[in-house]
Amino acid sequence: MAVLIVLGAYLALAWPASAALESGVYQTLPGATVEERGDRVPNGSRVVPFSATLTIDLSAAPPSLTATIPNAVLEGGEPFALTARSTSAAQLVHGTYWFTGDYLRDLYPSGTQYLFDWRFSTAADGRVMWNGITGWAGGHIWQVTISNLALVPQARLSIAQVGTGSVQLTWGTNFADYVLEYATSLPAAGWNTLTNAAVTLGDRLSITVDADAGQRFYRLRKP
């Protein structure tokens, strides 16, 4: 069985032509900020840097969201690393998806009253936009407002074994203009284009390749 390693794709900060929300991984742009307000926030409010990597699965029932935030804030304190996961979701009008959950549940599994209410929609220019609030549902004021943060979809490959002699490579249909390439070693003297025809499975593109005795490295590249 071949050993296949999936590499991160080469991705410029640009939106695919068809950028409607699909299952996949999204990232905020450099320089993104949010507003934090509350009784314990210095001067009552502040604008803070904000970055996140979002993994969205629209095929799940209900759809799911995992947000990895390296600089989350809470009650005016210092930034900290946090993973937030949705507990409920729904598709609203015009393709907007609505996710809610406990903001701190990964830190406090028994649950807290810090809740998030986030919505993702597609702007007229094709960008995926993030709006919503994170707040305290108890007896004092604390809220983070997310306003029109643009998200960049990340071109990522997934790999799965199919039977005993094949593997399946999949990536989002919003990266249909990307080229799947492979090399037999790293650093690579050159990359070869995989010519197998891709099959569309929902919002994913799929290619099945034979697992031979050699080692292969794969990447997605925007021409």
Image: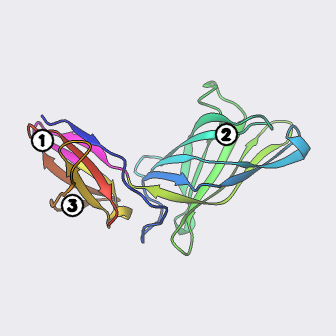
Q: Which residue is mark 1?
A: 211
In the image, 13 versus 66, the foreground residue is 13
Instruction: Place residue 128 in its image quadrant.
Output: bottom right
**Residue at figure coordinates x 56%, y 44% from the top left:** 88
Q: Quadrant of the C terminus?
A: bottom left
Q: Earlier in the sequence, mark 1 or mark 2?
A: 2
Which label's residue is closer to the chain start, 2 or 3?
A: 2
Q: Amino acid at mark 2?
A: Ala
Q: Amino acid at mark 1?
A: Ala
Chain-order first, disc 3 or disc 1: 3
Q: Answer with the quarter of the image where residue 94 lies.
A: bottom right
The stretch in magenta equals: 156-168
* C-alpha distance separating marks 2 and 3: 39 Å
**Between marks 3 and 1 in the image, the one whose residue lies nearer the viewer:** 1
Q: Residues within 10 Å of mark 1 (few under 14, many from 20)?
A: some
Q: Position of residue 44 (x, y in %)?
A: 89, 46
Q: Is 159 left, or right, of 192 in this rendering? A: right
Please name the residue that numbered disc 2 is placed on: 72
Q: Residue at x 42, y 67 (%)?
A: 16
The residue closer to the viewer here, 99 or 27, is 27
Give the structural element (helix, strand or loop) at label 2: strand
Quick check: marks 2 and 3 in contact, CB under 8 Å? no
Q: Would you say the residues marked 1 and 2 are in contact, meaning their CB atoms lie under 8 Å apart?
A: no
